[in-house]
Image (cartoon, coloured by chain):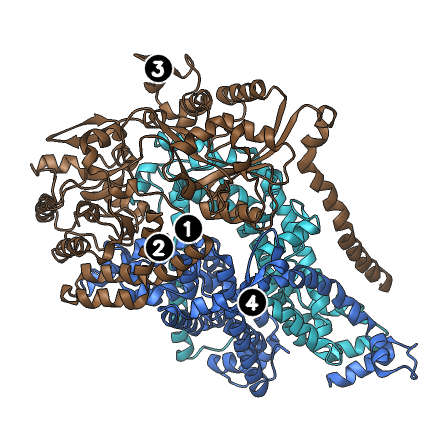
């Protein structure tokens, strides 16, 4: 269908297109508006994102200001070796992966569920109120959020008060490694669930309301309507966001981890980012962090490529 | 609707409303807490006695911020950055996303990959700083607006939304002699109000919270955005503030650093919450279908 | 329609091309002062300076004005300084980018000795060793610094910075850290303020019986590196100088004994389970609300803060750290050395691209002269200080005012630590710094009174409480050496810290100590790092 349209586009938009031209020039001329539209964005990305990209070379260099990035001496994979050969590398990678997967597994569906539930609220004013209130934590910086979390989890905090009702001994949650992941992922959801619904709500607004009416006439219950109308409406957005989130699995917010962790929770909390930070504390070894960062980028990119391929196979939606 | 709801439906409602109430309690707490601390007496804050309501009323945190001339400059700057930045983002992103929905577009896939790569690889701070220096963008208005105005993430989401628009609409427009630019501005964008509203909100909030670029690229205080200004008066763990008066007040125990910190959060959040209702009205079901039929 | 759209696009492209022009203009706004002064360029010294500020802006203060007058007299020329003062909290980050991209002003403060050497060797800064004859004042500081060639210069004897200096005309060596006790509670229940670890344990035990909900012994920062119990046992959580050689604390028996003691406190619920997670905010709440009564080690300034909370109505007192009689008097943390000297943690550098290097050297050197140090640290005689019995002291009228430090800051006296005139860091005159704080409660030998905690720390601690590490031979590492150190020690330190917590909590038994030591060895060759340190001492 779409192919037809585009074919037609060419002819209609470009009455002057000569049939003798080579196919490329011909299509280029036909699609001149499309090229023109892409151009400004292309240039900005090229300049601001691609021009500085030679900076990844720092990961392979002994960087020297006077010599610049190009002129600095090559050290090959030295920094990569240093990272991989450290005795706790495996643990930090494992912790990073687990934290990323948990965040994805629990954090990704949370706003979708909330968006669908919000969609079922019929009192419009209440719906708007819930929506607005649920955004609040997004605007409060992580430092403050973690401060509150520490308050809740302290010995005389809210969590222990509740645990006491069930006859549990008070626990200082923040220093116990077995609770770290739960607290990290949980507070992440707390902070992001409301804000995360916005995109899905925007996608839901694309659903045709007459479909709901028709479905009601046919005797569909709410569950069926949610499943057959609402869910399909947000599906393409969901899939794209999911593919992109897969790329974020390794990108743990290590600043937040640093605010939350302590020697008592290193076992589960020490991730790649925090480790690299500690190694670089003296001497600010940015070549080293650049190397580790590059490694993570490559892996993340591969993750996305794989997910994208799978997605293309099993659904119609994919990044490209 | 006239007919009765089934028992299941009612049970679901009860459950749903209950859940939403819980959500409200959980998510309203941080805000109340922040407001309460911003308004409480230093001693009660230190004692950890402030939770839902202010204790020992105190507005000095706000006074210190409002007394600064730089607050108004930086507020104005942020508004400028946010306005220009948002307009640029919406315009450029739409322009770039639209061609990616035309399946015959020759360089559709290369462009998408070209964009996606930037989500994972970047040159890092040093070459970017040098680039800005080369382009003479350091310490200018544009350094806050231009580099971030187009992002792979935004383009990909825009494209995904545009793909939902039935291609029949485009076809018929071509029949009427429209070109792609006209199709985008006359058909696609009017149908994508929810999308535009959403990303306007995202971009504004992004600019509202921006301080890192300012930290790196700006030296002139008069160009600082709001967050940079607020950061500079909030105390950090080193214990040195940047506001002489605040330091004195803290020494006299009239104020707790948290007073200023939380007041800063409130000052940042308030305007955003004010624009939200204007955005929200675009999230009504069927905006798109309505306009197709109209 | 088509035309308007094209118009928009063209406009957009115009904006993009316009940028360079636009930014060019605004770029010059930075160097405005240069343009203005072009007429008298011949004789005036123009300088761009990037330095931190600490809360107070010295511009226009009495001392800053005097300073500007003085330097012009000294150099015999007009001096125009273009000051950029960056808040201390942002300073490191903001200057890091400037340094790594080579975009620096004539003079700037650089933090981190490794940065000074690294960027210096790369040709960013003037090598001051070429100008040593032009800096008589700074030279006295260099000469007074022990082991100065290895501590301040690189292998080729190049010197890249005017390092952070200090001078102390007296021979006191105090620390700003001490133990802290909740005096009112101790007195109310007639509990002895501890002087030994055993007494500390007893006191905690009695307090626990009286306040079952409280955990008497608390900690204020997330460190197991410096800790009152470790100091009592004459060890530390890291690599340190023990008076003879560098050793790694966690491999020592004394470290194990400290953990055994902490484990005993933990088992009996005397130690706050948040011992290794609390930061100052949380500790402050506990200190003021009766949840903790003992801090084995605390920054002394916090006590004044606890006591000032009228709602809490608590009285805390400082005291010297509790001793472990087995080892003698407890070490105090971070004693400040007497006499003159330099510390290589930060320093002022001159850009290699700068034009008037000689004049700048002369100017910065002048800041190390006694005259200027006194001006910057004490202010002006009669306005901020007076001389009594040959000793300087701040004016009693200022000391007795409601806000003593605030008054000093207003005058621009650097001892306020908040408003610092001149091109900072300028040498700190220690007595001015020590006497510029209000008194706090300090307990010693059965009685507590309001005292200056610096002087108390010296008086009650005596020479034997000075930790040997505070007199460690000074040294510096090359980039490769510090890389090696970071790569070797980071995993070990991670493992040690988390194991220490496990020992304290009883999750690891002390019978596993040998295994713990073996694992440390397996994690990395810390002994080679110790050797690196000790070899440097040999040199």
> Chain C: what color?
brown
- Name the residue tied to disc 3: C397
Q: Secondary structure at mark 1?
A: loop
Determine the chain carrying the residue at label 2.
C
Which disc number belongs to residue C532? 2
* Distance in Å between CA atoms under marks 1 and 4: 52 Å
> Above or below — where is B261 with respect to A19?
above
* Distance in Å between CA atoms under marks 1 and 2: 9 Å
Determine the chain carrying the residue at label 1.
C
Badge 3 crowding class, 10 Å Cα cut-off, few under 14, some 14 to 19, many 20 or more, is few
- Name the residue tied to disc 1: C477
Residue at (42% x, 56% y) in the render: C481
Badge 2 crowding class, 10 Å Cα cut-off, few under 14, some 14 to 19, many 20 or more, is some
> Above or below — where is C70 with respect to B93?
above
* Distance in Å between CA atoms under marks 1 and 3: 48 Å
- Name the residue tied to disc 4: A199
- Report the front residue among B5 and C106: C106
Is circle 4 on the same chain as circle 3?
A: no
> Chain A: what color?
blue
* Distance in Å between CA atoms under marks 4 and 3: 64 Å
- Report the front residue among B8 and C437: C437
Q: Secondary structure at mark 4?
A: helix
């Amino acid at each position: 269908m779409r192919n037809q349209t585009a074919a037609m586009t060419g002819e209609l938009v470009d009455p002057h297109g000569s049939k003798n031209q080579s196919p490329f020039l011909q299509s280029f001329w036909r699609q001149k508006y499309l090229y023109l539209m892409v151009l400004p964005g292309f240039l900005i990305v090229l300049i601001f994102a691609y021009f500085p990209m030679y900076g990844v070379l720092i990961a392979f260099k002994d960087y020297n200001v006077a010599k610049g990035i190009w002129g600095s001496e090559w050290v090959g994979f030295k920094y990569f070796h240093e990272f991989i050969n450290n005795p706790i590398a495996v643990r930090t990678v494992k912790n990073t992966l687990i934290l990323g997967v948990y965040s994805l597994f629990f954090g990704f569906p949370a706003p979708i569920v909330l968006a669908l539930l919000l969609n079922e609220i019929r009192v419009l004013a209440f719906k708007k109120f819930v929506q607005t209130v649920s955004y609040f934590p997004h605007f409060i910086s992580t430092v403050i959020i973690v401060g509150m979390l520490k308050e809740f989890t302290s010995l005389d905090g809210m969590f222990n008060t509740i645990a006491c009702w069930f006859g549990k001994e008070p626990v200082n949650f923040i220093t116990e490694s077995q609770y770290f992941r739960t607290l990290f992922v949980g507070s992440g959801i707390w902070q992001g669930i409301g804000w995360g619904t916005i995109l899905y709500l925007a996608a839901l607004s694309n659903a045709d309301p007459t479909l709901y009416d028709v479905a009601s006439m046919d005797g569909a219950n709410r569950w069926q309507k949610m499943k057959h109308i609402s869910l399909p409406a947000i599906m393409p957005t969901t899939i794209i966001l999911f593919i992109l989130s897969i790329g974020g699995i390794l990108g743990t917010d290590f600043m937040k981890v640093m605010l939350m962790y302590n020697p008592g929770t290193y076992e589960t909390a020490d991730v790649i980012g925090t480790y690299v930070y500690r190694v670089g504390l003296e001497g600010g070894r940015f070549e080293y962090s650049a190397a580790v960062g590059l490694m993570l980028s490559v892996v993340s990119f591969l993750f996305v490529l794989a997910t994208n391929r799978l997605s293309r196979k099993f659904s119609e939606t994919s990044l490209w | 609707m006239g007919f009765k709801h089934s028992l299941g439906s009612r049970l679901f409602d009860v459950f749903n409303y209950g859940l939403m109430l819980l959500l409200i309690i959980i998510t309203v707490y941080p805000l109340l807490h922040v407001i309460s601390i911003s308004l409480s007496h230093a001693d009660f804050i230190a004692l950890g006695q402030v939770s839902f309501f202010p204790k020992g009323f105190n507005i000095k945190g706000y006074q210190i911020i409002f007394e600064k001339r730089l607050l108004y400059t930086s507020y104005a700057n942020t508004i400028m950055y946010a306005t220009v930045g948002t307009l640029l983002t919406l315009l450029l992103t739409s322009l770039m996303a639209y061609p990616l929905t035309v399946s015959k577009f020759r360089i559709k896939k290369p462009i998408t990959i070209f964009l996606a790569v930037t989500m994972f690889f970047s040159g890092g701070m040093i070459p970017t700083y040098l680039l800005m220096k080369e382009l003479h963008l350091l310490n200018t208005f544009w350094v806050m607006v231009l580099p971030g105005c187009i992002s792979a993430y935004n383009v990909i989401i825009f494209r995904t939304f545009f793909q939902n628009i039935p291609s029949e609409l485009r076809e018929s427009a071509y029949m009427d002699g429209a070109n792609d630019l006209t199709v985008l501005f006359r058909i696609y964008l009017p149908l994508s109000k929810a999308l535009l509203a959403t990303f306007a909100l995202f971009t504004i909030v992004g600019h509202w919270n921006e301080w890192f670029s300012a930290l790196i690229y700006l030296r002139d205080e008069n160009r600082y955005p709001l967050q940079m200004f607020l950061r500079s008066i909030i105390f950090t763990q080193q214990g040195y503030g940047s506001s002489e008066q605040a330091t004195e007040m803290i020494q006299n125990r009239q104020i707790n650093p948290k007073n200023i910190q939380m007041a800063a959060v409130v000052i940042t959040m308030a305007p955003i919450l004010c624009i939200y209702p204007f955005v929200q009205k675009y999230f009504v079901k069927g905006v798109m279908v309505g306009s197709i039929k109209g | 329609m088509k035309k308007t759209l094209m118009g928009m696009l063209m406009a957009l492209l115009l904006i993009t091309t316009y940028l360079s022009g636009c930014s060019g203009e605004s770029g010059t706004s930075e160097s405005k002062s240069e343009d203005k002064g072009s007429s008298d360029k011949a004789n005036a010294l123009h300088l761009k300076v990037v330095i931190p500020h600490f809360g107070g802006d010295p511009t226009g203060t009495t001392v800053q004005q005097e300073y500007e007058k003085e330097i012009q007299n000294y150099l015999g020329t007009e001096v125009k300084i273009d000051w950029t003062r960056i808040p201390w909290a942002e300073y490191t980050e903001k200057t890091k980018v400037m340094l790594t991209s080579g975009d620096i002003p004539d003079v700037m403060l650089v933090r981190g000795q490794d940065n000074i050497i690294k960027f210096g060797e790369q040709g960013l800064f003037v090598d001051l060793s070429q100008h040593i004859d032009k800096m008589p004042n700074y030279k006295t500081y260099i000469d007074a610094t022990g082991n100065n060639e290895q501590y301040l210069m690189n292998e080729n004897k190049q010197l890249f910075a005017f390092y952070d200096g200090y001078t102390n005309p007296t021979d006191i060596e105090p620390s700003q850290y001490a133990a802290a006790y909740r005096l009112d509670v101790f007195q109310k229940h007639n509990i002895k303020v501890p002087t030994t670890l055993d007494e500390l344990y007893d006191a905690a035990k009695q307090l626990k019986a009286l306040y079952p909900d409280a955990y008497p012994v608390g900690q204020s920062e997330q460190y197991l590196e410096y800790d009152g119990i470790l100091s009592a046992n004459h060890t530390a959580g890291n690599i340190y100088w023990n008076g003879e050689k560098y050793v790694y604390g966690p491999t020592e028996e004394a470290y194990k004994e400290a953990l055994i003691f902490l484990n005993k406190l933990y088992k009996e619920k005397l130690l706050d389970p948040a011992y290794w997670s609390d930061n100052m905010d949380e500790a402050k709440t506990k200190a003021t609300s009766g949840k903790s009564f003992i801090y084995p080690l605390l920054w002394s300034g916090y006590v004044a803060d606890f006591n000032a909370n009228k709602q809490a109505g608590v009285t805390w007192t400082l005291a010297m750290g509790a001793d472990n009689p087995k080892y003698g008097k407890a070490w105090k943390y971070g004693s400040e050395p007497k006499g003159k000297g330099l510390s290589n943690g930060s320093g002022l550098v001159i850009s290699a691209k700068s034009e008037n290097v000689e004049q700048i050297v002369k100017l910065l050197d002048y800041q190390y002269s006694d005259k200027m140090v006194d001006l910057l640290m004490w202010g002006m005689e009669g306005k901020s200080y007076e001389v009594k019995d040959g000793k300087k002291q701040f004016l009693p009228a200022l000391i007795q005012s409601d806000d003593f430090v605030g008054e000093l800051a207003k005058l621009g006296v650097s001892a306020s630590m908040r408003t610092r005139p001149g091109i900072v860091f300028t040498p700190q005159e220690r007595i001015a710094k020590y006497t510029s704080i209000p008194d706090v409660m300090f307990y010693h030998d059965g009685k507590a009174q309001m005292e200056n905690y610096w002087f108390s720390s010296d008086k009650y601690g005596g020479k034997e409480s000075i930790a040997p590490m505070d007199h460690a031979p000074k040294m510096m590492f090359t980039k490769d050496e510090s890389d090696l150190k970071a790569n070797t020690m980071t995993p070990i330190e991670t493992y040690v810290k988390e194991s220490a917590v496990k020992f304290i909590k009883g999750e690891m038994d002390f019978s596993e100590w040998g295994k713990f030591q073996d694992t440390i060895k397996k994690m990395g060759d810390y002994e080679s790092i110790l050797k690196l340190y000790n070899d440097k001492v040999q040199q």
